[in-house]
Amino acid sequence: MAKTKTVFLCQECGHDSPKWQGRCPACGQWNTLVEETVRPAGKSGHAAGLGALTSRPPQPITQIPSDDGRRLSTGLNEFDRILGGGLVEGSVTLLGGEPGVGKSTLMLQVAHRLAASLEPPVLYITGEESARQTRMRAERLGAFHDRLLVQCETDVDTILATLDKVKPSVAVIDSIQTLASAEVTSAPGSVSQIRESAARLVRMAKETGLAVFFIGHVTKEGIVAGPRLLEHMVDTVLYFEGERHFSYRILRSVKNRFGSTNEIGIFEMGEEGLRPVANPSEMFLSERPADTAGSVVLAAIEGTRPLLVEVQALVSPNGGFGTPRRSSHGMDSKRLALILAVLEKRVGLPLSNQDVFANLAGGLRIEEPALDLAMAAAVAGSALNQPIEQRTAVFGEIGLAGETRSVGQLEKRINEARRLGFHTCVYGAPPKEKPRREDGIQLYPASTVDEALRLLGLVKR
């Protein structure tokens, strides 16, 4: 019989070390190494419980049956959009988010709608709440159906036996950090337990065609707690974002084997649960102040969806007290520093002694390069104290030489601006492109930042 051995596993990244260290050499976190027992490998070479899928002989790819493309609708349009058009049979989806953001509420609503539309039952397995607590949540949401089954369980072997007996169409695990296997000696929530539990459930999902949802907690850094291996094991990774003191929530896809990544869905939290927001652009602009310097509307693309978002900037004198402050929310701070340098060097705006604050209204975070020109316009408008016309949309990438560059999906951005009543678009384009008018909206291409600011009416007095 092979001897067992102990190693020290990092609870943040899963790195193993033969001896304890105060700081993990892989991720750099302090006091995260915990002693755990490593089980010996079986005859197949795999550790117990972590074997491969059912072995099949190799076959030509042309003879493998193709997927019919059938997807299960969850009944929530925004959720289906994130998944790429619906839920794929045999897929494993990981939903992460901060405590209290509404993960369990969202998944209970999804489970209820799936139970109402599918013949096999939907199984909701909770390891954090009792059956009565789950019923109380369901009463508030109106999520009652005979085919929605609830089980309170944390033992993986018992859960697998239940799944084999009930044979549901969809299973929800709330949460993956609460599961434990008797074959692993460490405590629930440890790296070994999460890895073991997830591996066994993923293997079962692939062999039976069962669609599985994992609900996971996130760390203070904003990533799902446990080893990063967990995100590689699943097919789709979703993050549920939003401030608990505000009603709007953003569901973001960061990995999807069956659809587009960086897709987002907007939900509004109410007394009866989460409600999809049909027109997010209108929601993001609903509280925009009129004729305010430093406010610009960006025509952005998130995944396949066009969005109009307000970009705000505030420029104020530093007063000679230390280094000027540069603060941003919803955008890359390094990108903001680059835009400020271009404005000072290429346009001549004196910003070296000014505090600059930038913000994306609505709690949205955007990283695409089309944000550059809108950010530059907002900073210049605040620095010059000149408002930009209210119904003007701006987008484009900025280079270090002060040139602007075109971005993709131009028509989608223009159509979204036209749909919400905007009559002017200023965007980055090659030097030879001429202004034109299309279906009631005036289009002004700009090849440099200076030209774009002049088209927006921002001139130095």
Image (tube, rainbow, N blue to C red):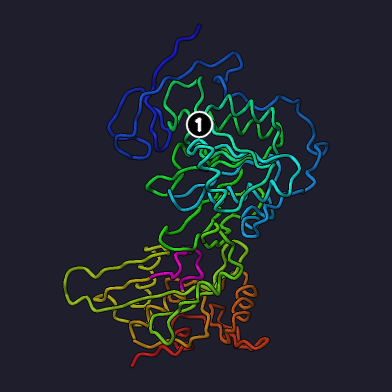
Q: Above or below — where is 347 with respect to 307?
A: below
Q: Which residues are magenta?
A: 359-372
Asked if the stretch drawn in magenta spans residue 366, the answer is yes
At 29% across and 29% down in the image, what residue appears? 21
Q: Above or below — where is 441 with respect to 240?
A: below
At 62% across and 86% down in the image, what residue appears? 441
Q: Secondary structure at mark 1?
A: loop
At 47% across and 63% down in the image, what residue appears? 247
Q: Is residue 4 left or right of residue 126?
A: left
Q: Is residue 220 left or right of residue 301?
A: left
Q: Can you name the residue that lies furthest to the left here?
A: 321
Please tell me which residue lies in front, 446 or 286. 286
Q: Is residue 93 left or right of residue 23?
A: right
Rendering quarter of residue 307: bottom right
Q: Position of residue 445 (x, y in %)?
A: 56, 83
Q: Above or below — where is 301 with respect to 237?
A: below
Observer able to see residue 397: yes
Please tell me which residue lies in front, 101 or 13. 101
Circle 1: residue type: Leu
Observer able to see residue 405: no
**Quadrant of the frame with the C terminus:** bottom left
Rendering quarter of residue 315: bottom left
Q: Position of residue 166 (x, y in %)?
A: 69, 31
Mark 1 surroundings within 10 Å by alpha-carbon count, few (fewer than 14), some (14 through 19), many (20 or more): many
At 47% across and 87% down in the image, what residue appears? 456
Q: Above or below — where is 151 with respect to 451?
A: above
Q: Can you name the residue that lies furthest to the bottom here?
A: 461
Asked if the stretch drawn in magenta spans residue 172, the answer is no
Q: Position of residue 320 (x, y in %)?
A: 17, 75
Residue identified by numbered label 1: 179
